[in-house]
Structures are given as structure tokens and as C-alpha cells.
Amino acid sequence: MKSNTRAEDGKRRIAVVGPMPPSKSGIARHTASVAQALEARGDAEVRVWSFYRQYPRLLFPGEAEESEDFAQNLALSTRTIGGTAPLSWHRTIREIAAFGPNDLVMPAWTFFLAPALGCIARALRRRGSRCTMIVHNVSDHEGAAWKDRLMTYQLVQADQFLTHNAALRDTLQAQFPGRPVHVFPHPVFSDYPEPTGALARDWPLELLFFGLVRPYKGLDILIDAFALSGRTDARLTIVGEFWAGLKDTRDKIAALRVKDRIELVPRFVGDAEAAEFFARADAVVLPYRSVTGSGVIPTAYRYGRAVVASDLPGLADVVDHGKTGWLVPSGDVEALASCIRNLERTQAGHAGNRARAYGETLTWERFVVPVWR
């Protein structure tokens, strides 16, 4: 068991390692919220080591890895890690070791950065730090055995795990028996701005698909279902940067003759603009083919919006069917179309009110409690 005692000056020291804003990802926002919650307790010195670059430009399919619209300030944060620069990993290890943390906290979510984070965790555990890993994924969405081996290299360095759903807990317990696994639903991002009402609700029903577009998120399923629903009084707004498939998406919308009812915003949007899209929506739709969790649902709850989601672990854990939203079988176009066909604004509004109340219980302070155990 690793050291969990306080440093010689009487104050516990916690090192958080992971991506941070302005890296424009949900993992970066999540890591920042974790660090802020740890810092807010006031009885520990918290420092953050983050990435100056996660992916080589040739391997990053998005427009840019960072956005100043996504910047957040956090005390004592430094960007020292290059995802493919081993020398930077060892410099970071030396810096963190000089800080002398009792605890190391880091996310695990992608095979590509697992070597860097695993190397850092391994070295610091040998120096006496206890490692808590926040597990978003155990394997890649587009999986392969070699990717799983890289993920395992990082995960095996953990003393305990935090995750957001029971399915991931079961996987971790089977793969790493005897190591504590703590489960708490994805907390609500409380730092999102209030909307101004800049976007008018021009349609009797407004639906929103939000976030980075990748094949596993099932946008094509949603477009098919929206067309099949036959709704001529509803608008679907698609907001998010496409890593692939933008042309195919536009072609599908045209072929299904729903272009007049679909608003496509194929780019990253900052927090202020995102707030307006969530505020206009009656329901947020997540038609995922596979998933282990999503920051989109707690964001919907923060704005008091109902959710329509695939009945998958990681989503079903936080969507109370018929109360905070509705669950449909993953990949079932007809079931999703039926849900859209029967959804009304008043019904969605009631579910949204319940979603907001539930979201208020999902705090970051509660999520990080196991770090102190």
C-alpha cells in the first residue's frame, strides 16, 4: 500500500497529471474540474502537470488541439508533457518527485497517451506516491489487441480506480482483482455560463446532438431516425467538430430530404455558444453505438434539458427512463424514430426539470472523496 500520510510541512500534497484546457476535450475539462475540487477542500496543496501537445499534428484529425475559447485558469498548473516525447515524461517525473506528492491523480482514456501516463505513474509509485486513476475507457472505441495492451500498461500502475459506471467497475475488478474501484456518476460541469437566449426556439420541438463527431456516437442513426419519424414540426441541430464523415453526413441529410429541418454546425464551439444551443433545445439526443460515459448528459442536466439516449452502460446509469429522459435500444432506428415522433415540448420540459434537480446532486466534491481514503 502506498503512502497516504501528510508531507513534512503538515499539508497533504496531490499531483494531478492529465490534459487541461485550452485542450478542447471533455477529458481536459474533466481533469480541470477534478483538480479544482481537490483544491477547493483547502487542506491539500494541489499542483497540475499537463500536456503542451498530446498528438502529433499528422495524427490529429481535428482542426486544432486547443482553443482559447476553452481556456480555464488553475493555480500551479504547468504544461510539461509531450505525448510522443519520452524525454518530457522523465523531466515531468523529476519535477513531480521534487514536489513530493502523497497522491497522484490522473485520467485513463486512450491507448495513445497510455505510455506517457503509465511511465509517469510507474516512476512516482516507486517513489511512494499512491496513484488514483480516473478511468473513462478500459479499451479504445475502435479496439485492437495492441491498443488494449497499451491501456493495460497504464492501468496496472493504479492503486485504486474511480469511474462513472458499474460496467466499467466490473471490468476493472475482473482485470485487476483486489484493487479498490469507486463508482460515482459523471458530475455536472458547474462552470458553464448562463445562456442569454440569443437563439430563438423557432420550432415546436428542438433536438440537439452535441460534441465531437466520431462513428461510435451514431449520428447517422439519429439522422435516419429523425427522417423516419416524419416530424415536420421539429428541428435537429448538430453541433460538433467532425474528425471524419462530414461529407457523408451532408449527403445523407440531402438524400433523406431533411435539410430544411436539420441545422448543421460542423465545428468546435466555446462554452458561451454551447450554452445557447443547450438552452434552445428541448431534448439532447445521444444515439451512441458504444460508450463508457459522456460529459454531454451532465451538461444537459446543468441546463435542465431532457435526454434521449441509447440504453448502454454509462448512459443508462444516469438517465432515469421516463423521468429525466428516455432510453432506446442502441442502433435501433425505428425505436429512436418512435421516441422522436411521440416527444412533445411540455413532456420534455417536465423531464428537464427533474434532470436539473438530479444534476444538482452530482458534485465534483463528492466524486473526489476516495482520493482522501
Image: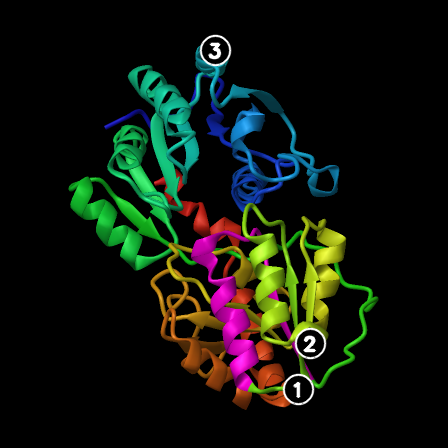
Q: In the figure, is residue 162 to the left or right of 202?
A: left
The residue that mark 3 highlights is 98
Q: Amino acid at mark 1?
A: Thr
Badge 1 local density, few (<14 within 10 Å), some, or many (20+)?
some
Instruction: Provide the secondary structure element on which disc 3 rests.
Output: helix
The residue that mark 1 highlights is 232
Point 60% across, 54% down: residue: 246
Figure quadrant of residue 350: bottom right
Label 1 near label 2: C-beta < 8 Å?
yes
How did the renderer colour the structure? rainbow
Q: Amino acid at mark 2?
A: Arg
Kindly report the distance in space between the C-alpha atoms of the residues bearing marks 2 and 3. 57 Å
- Whether residue 354 is visible here, answered yes or no, is no
Q: Earlier in the sequence, mark 3 or mark 1?
A: 3
* Picture coordinates of residue 66, whole percent (x, y): 66, 35
Point 51% across, 50% down: residue: 364
The residue that mark 2 highlights is 261
* Picture coordinates of residue 346, whole percent (x, y): 63, 89
